Image (cartoon, coloured by chain):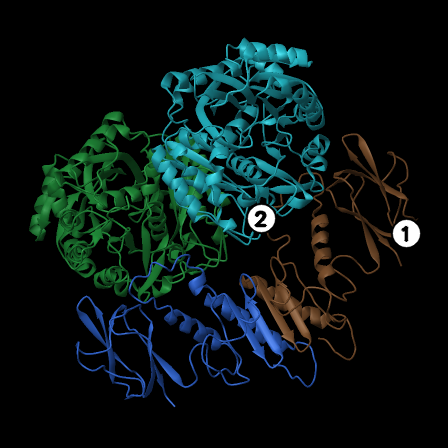
Chain colours: A blue, B brown, C green, D cyan
Amino acid sequence: MSDPGTARGLTDEDVDQVTRLVESLDRSGFDFLQVELGDLRITVGTGEPPVPGAAPPPPAAATPAAVPQAVAPARNAADRPDTAVAPSAAPVAAGSVAAGSVAAGSVAAGSVAAGSVAAGSVEITAPTMGIFYARPEPGKPPFVAVGDVVEETTTVALVEVMKTFHSVAAGVRGTVVEICVSDTDFVEFGAVLMRVSTE
Amino acid sequence: MSDPGTARGLTDEDVDQVTRLVESLDRSGFDFLQVELGDLRITVGTGEPPVPGAAPPPPAAATPAAVPQAVAPARNAADRPDTAVAPSAAPVAAGSVAAGSVAAGSVAAGSVAAGSVAAGSVEITAPTMGIFYARPEPGKPPFVAVGDVVEETTTVALVEVMKTFHSVAAGVRGTVVEICVSDTDFVEFGAVLMRVSTE
Amino acid sequence: MSGSIRRVLVANRGEIAVRIVHACRELGIETVLAVSEADRDSLGARLADRAVCIGPPRAPQSYLDVARIVTAAVATGCDAVHPGYGFLSESPALARACTEHGLTFVGPTAAQLEAMGDKISARRLAREAGVPTLPGSEQVRTPQEALAVAREVGLPLIVKASAGGGGRGMKVVSDVAELPSVLTTAAAEAAAAFGDPTLYVERFVRNARHVEVQVLGDRHGHVVHLGERDCSLQRRNQKVVEEAPAPGLPLQVRDALHAAAVRLARRIGYESAGTVEFVLDRDTGEFFFLEMNTRIQVEHPVTELVTGIDLVQQQLRVAAGEPLAFGQCDVVHRGHAIECRITAEVPSADFRPDAGRITAWDPPGGPNVRVDTHCVPGYLVPVYYDSLLAKLIVYAPTRAEAIARARSALRRFGIEGVRTTVGFLDFLVGRPEFADATMTTHTIADALGEFAPADAA
Amino acid sequence: MSGSIRRVLVANRGEIAVRIVHACRELGIETVLAVSEADRDSLGARLADRAVCIGPPRAPQSYLDVARIVTAAVATGCDAVHPGYGFLSESPALARACTEHGLTFVGPTAAQLEAMGDKISARRLAREAGVPTLPGSEQVRTPQEALAVAREVGLPLIVKASAGGGGRGMKVVSDVAELPSVLTTAAAEAAAAFGDPTLYVERFVRNARHVEVQVLGDRHGHVVHLGERDCSLQRRNQKVVEEAPAPGLPLQVRDALHAAAVRLARRIGYESAGTVEFVLDRDTGEFFFLEMNTRIQVEHPVTELVTGIDLVQQQLRVAAGEPLAFGQCDVVHRGHAIECRITAEVPSADFRPDAGRITAWDPPGGPNVRVDTHCVPGYLVPVYYDSLLAKLIVYAPTRAEAIARARSALRRFGIEGVRTTVGFLDFLVGRPEFADATMTTHTIADALGEFAPADAA
C-alpha cells in the first residue's frame, strides 16, 4: 500500500482499501480500527481516538513484523456500567473479544493472524453456555492437560446445562497450549475454553 | 499527495481522494478517520479534533509547511433537521457555515486558503442582527458596489434594529469583490455581508 | 423491597428487557440480562449490571431454552427470573424449574399458567367465575361434533387451538360445508405449531371490539383491576394501536368488565399482573371472555400512564411476597393514553419485516411522550426476532388531545436505515373510525386500501 | 389551536427553549429559536424549525435585547413570542413592543407584568384581594421610617428592593442599630442591579417554608389553580429541589392558599400561567404573600406530572385567545412529583460554576422519570449563562416512592466533563428533614456541613 522509498500521494487503490476498511468496520459493530504498516497507520472509529501508548499494541500474543494489525474493541468492559455483580462464576468476555478481532483482522490485506489469536493456534469455544467440567468425574484425571496432543475427535471437556452434559470435541489436531477456564467454572456461549497449537 | 522535497498545497486529486474518504466516513456513522502515510497525515472527524499527543496528528502549529492537513467539519448543516421554514426573509446560514469553515481552516497549518474564504479576500460581517440597507436612503445610490475601493472607515451599509441604524465600516482597505446580501434583507448576527479583496 | 429479591435474571430481549432493567434498578435490584449472541451489544446488555451470553441467535437455543435460562440464573447468583412477554413468559416449565432451583419466578404460579394456557380450561374457569363466554364447545374431536355445535351456535364460527392464544391458530368458518376440511387443517397446524392438535369452536363476532382489563393480585388474596384497554386496531390478529381507557364504553359495561376480570382472577387466586381479554360485540353490546394473559403485556404502558402505577415494579413487589400497597379505591384513573407499536416492516410490501442497521434514531421528546425502546443509532436490527422497534406512548388529559399528540410525535420520529410503520401508524391514528371511536378488529384490514405508503411513492 | 398562532419566536435558551419547541410542535406551531452566537449549535437550535443568531454570547446584546428579539420575530414571519423564564420573560417593555408590532406575547399583559414586577405594588394588590401579606411597610425612604416599622413589626426584619424579586436584593436585619447602614447599602445595590433604589421592609420569618400556587387564567375571565408546590430547599435564595403537592400541609391551609392565589389572579384579570408565592411560618402556621411570578416557572414540571396538564401548551392556547378547556373541578391531582435542578457547579468549591465540554451524558430512563435538558454528549457548557444543565423530575403514587425514585435516578445519572450537583442532590433528597417533610428554607445551609462531596475526596 505504501512504499517508504518513494513518497507519494494516495492512490485509488489506497482509497479503495481504506474505504473497504471503513465499510467493513461499519458493518462489524466494533468501535474503531487502526492499521499500521511500516509508516502507514490508519485509524477509524467512534468516540474518542485511541490513547497513545495503548493504541498500537494488540491485546495478546506477539505478532510477526510487517503484519498489519489489530483491532481493539473498545466497549467490551468499559461500556458495561457495572460488571461487578459477578458472583463466583468467571465472566467470559474473552469469547467476544476474540470474535471481534478475527472479524476485523480478516479485513486487513495480507493478514495471516488476527487479534488475540496467536499465530498457529486455534481456540476451542463453548458449544453451549453451562458449567465447564475438565474431568469426566470428580477424582478422575482431566480429559486433557497442557502439552497433550489432541485429534479432531478427542473429548476435551464437558459442559453441563441442568444435568445434560455436552461433550466438547477438540475439532482440530494439535497440542493443547492453554486451558482458559477452571474446572466447574460457569462459561458463556462461545467462551474460549482452550487453545491448541496446530504447528 | 505530499512531496517532502517540494512543499506544496493540496492538489485537486488530493482533495478528490480526501473527499472520498470523508464521504466514506460520513456514510459510515463513525466519528473520525485518521490516515498517515510517511509524512502524510489525514484526520477527519466529528466533535473536537484528536487530542495532541494522544493521537498522532498535532492539531495545529509545530507542523512543517510541507504537511497538508485537513480537518473537515462533518456535520454543519446536516444536523439541523429542518431549515425549511424560511419565510420571506433570506435565511443567512452562510454566516454559520463560513464560521465553521474558518475555524477548520485555521487549524490547517500552512494552508493558504480555508473553506469558503477566497485567497486574499476578507469578509465584512454583520455587527448586529437586523435589516441590511445597501443605501443611505431609498432612491439614493448604494454605499458601495462591486469593484469599488474602500478604506477601513468607509461606510458600506446600514443594519437596522427597530429604527436604530448601525453603520457598517469596511474595516479593511481593498476592493469590493462581492456583495452577499440584497438591500433590505434580514441578516443574522455575524452574517457575511461583503467580501473585499486586499490584494 | 430489597428484602427477598436481590438479583434478577431478565430472560428476554428488546424493549421489554430495557424496561425490566429500569424497574429493577429503581427498586435497588441488580440485573443479569440473558442475551443471545445477536444481542450481546444491545442496549439492555449495556444497562444491565451484567449480561450473560446463553446461546446462539436462534431463540430455541437461547431465549426459549428453559435449562439455559435456569442455569444462567443459578450460575450468576440470581434469586429471581423475570420472563417479560413472549418467549417463556407463560411457560409452566420455566416457572416450575425456577421453583425447583430456589428461584422466584416473577409471574403467577405454574398451575395458574397451565390453567390459563389451555384455552379450553380457561373457558371453563371463566364460566365457573360467572364470566360470559362465547357460545361454543369444549374440545371438538370429530366433524360431527363440530357440526352439532354449528347448528346450536350458528355461523360464522371460529375454530381455535386450545394450546394457541394471542390470535395464533384460528380459522373462521362461514360455510358449514367447509367445516370438516378446516378442522383437519387446523388440527394439523395446531399439532405442528403447539405440539397439541386439540381444537375448540366458538361463535365468531364479526363486528367486534377487543377490550381487556388489567388485573393485579398478590399472594395475600388481594386482587385489584387497573381499568381497561381497547386494542381493536389489529392487523392479522396482532395489536397495532392500544389505548386506555376504552372510549365510548357505557359505564355499566365498563363496570361489568372490571368486575368480571376481578372475579376470574380471584377464582384462581391470581398473584401477579395479568390481563383478561374480552370481545365486545358492537351489534349487541354483549361482551365475552376470550382468554387471560398471565404475564406483563406489550401494551401495559397505557395503563401505567392513566393510573400512575408502575406495573413491572408491582410484579416484582408481589413476586417478592409483598402485599399490594393500595386498594381498589386508591387507583385513580386520569386522562387518556395511546400506544403505537413501531415495527421494522415495509407497509408497501405487505408489511414484510425489514432488518438492517439503524443509521439515524431520533425519537420525539417532551413531556407526556414516552418511548420504550432498545434501539439506538447504529443498532443492527437482527433478523431472528420480532420486528418491534419501539412503543410510542402518549398521555393527555383528553382522548382528542392524546390523538393529536400521538400524530405529532409520530411525525417527529426520525428513523433511517430500516423501513418502519411510523407513517402507517400516523395514517391509522388519523382515521375517522379512530377519531369517533367506532373502530373494530377489522378496521385496519378495511382501511388498508386507502393507505398510500410514502415508501411506495 | 393553529388558528391564531402559526409561528412562535422562542426568546430563550437552554432546557426551557427545548421545552417550548416541543410544546409548539405538538400544537402544530412552527418555531424560530433566537440564539446567541454561543448557542448556534444547541439542541434547541437543532429541534426548532429555524434558528436565528441575534447577537454575541453576552445576554445584554442578545437574549436581553428587546429590539433584537422583536426584529427577529417580525423578520422571520413569527406571529408570537414566547419568552420562557428569566431574561425578558417579565419585561413589560417586551410585552409592549410585541403588541406594537402585531406580535402575541405569550404571557400576561404589560400592565399585569408591571403591577407584579413592582413588589410594593404587588403587596398592595395582594392586600386588596384579601391575601395576607407580611407585616411591613410601603416604600421606606429614610432610616426613621424604617425604625418606625421595626418598632411596629419587631425584629428580625428583611429589607427588599421593590424592583427585585426571586430572592435578589434582600438583606436580613437582626439588630436595629444596623438598620441605617443596611438601608444605605441596599439602596445602592438595588439602584445598581435594577436601576431603582426603592426599598421596602417586611417581617422576616425565621422558620419558613416556601410554598407556591400555580394559577392559570384566560382572556375570558376564567382562573383556575393547579395546586401548590413546596420549594423550601433553597441555597442562597435559589430553589434546588421542588415538589408537588406540598407534604404535610393541613387541608384547610392548603385550601386557603389555593383560594388566596386565585383571588389575587382574578383581582388583576390574570391571563396566562403564573405563580403566587407564599412564605409559611412553621412556628405559627400562618402564611403570607411573597410575590407573584408572571411567567412559566423552572419547576412547572412537578405540577404537570401531578395534574397531567401541559402548562406550556396552556400558555400558548390562552395566548391564542382560547378559553380554558377545563374548569377547577376537572383538575385531578394524583401522586407525587419531585424535581431536582442539576447544575454545573462544584459543591466542594462553594458551588462555583463549572463550564466546559460534557464528554459523557447518560440521563436515567424508564417511565415516570422525566429529564428536561438541552445537554447532549459533546455539549460545551458556555460560561455566559446560568449553570442549569437539566431538571430531573420523577413521579410516583406516593411521596416515599417518589423520593426513592429520585435517588435511584440521580445515582444512574452519568455526566462526565463538567462537575455537577448530582451527588449533592442525592444527599439532599436523602436528608431526614426531607423524608419527614420538616425542611425549611434554611435546611440546606444547616445541612451543608454534613455533605462530603465525592469530588473533594
Count of marks overlaid on the render = 2
Q: Quadrant of residue C255?
A: top left
Q: What element carries label 2?
A: loop
Percent x, y of residue D356 = 61, 50
Residue A84 visible somewhere in the drawing: yes
Question: In the picture shown, does residue D128 fall above or below B97?
Answer: above
Q: What element carries label 1?
A: loop
Neighbours of disc 2 within 10 Å: few (<14), some (14-19), many (20+): some
Q: Residue B173 carries which label?
A: 1
Question: In the picture shown, does residue B78 fall above or below A49?
Answer: above
Percent x, y of residue D260 = 47, 15
Q: Say which amino acid is labelled 2.
A: Pro
Q: Say which amino acid is labelled 1.
A: Arg
Q: Which mark is residue C43?
A: none
Viewer-nearest residue: D200 or D358: D200
Would residue B60 appear left or right of C93 to someone viewing this image? right
Q: How far, Cα to Cα, is label 2 from label 1?
A: 39 Å
Would residue C180 appear left or right of C228 to someone viewing this image? left
Would residue D368 appear left or right of B90 to someone viewing this image? left
Check disc 2 and report the residue beneath it: B81
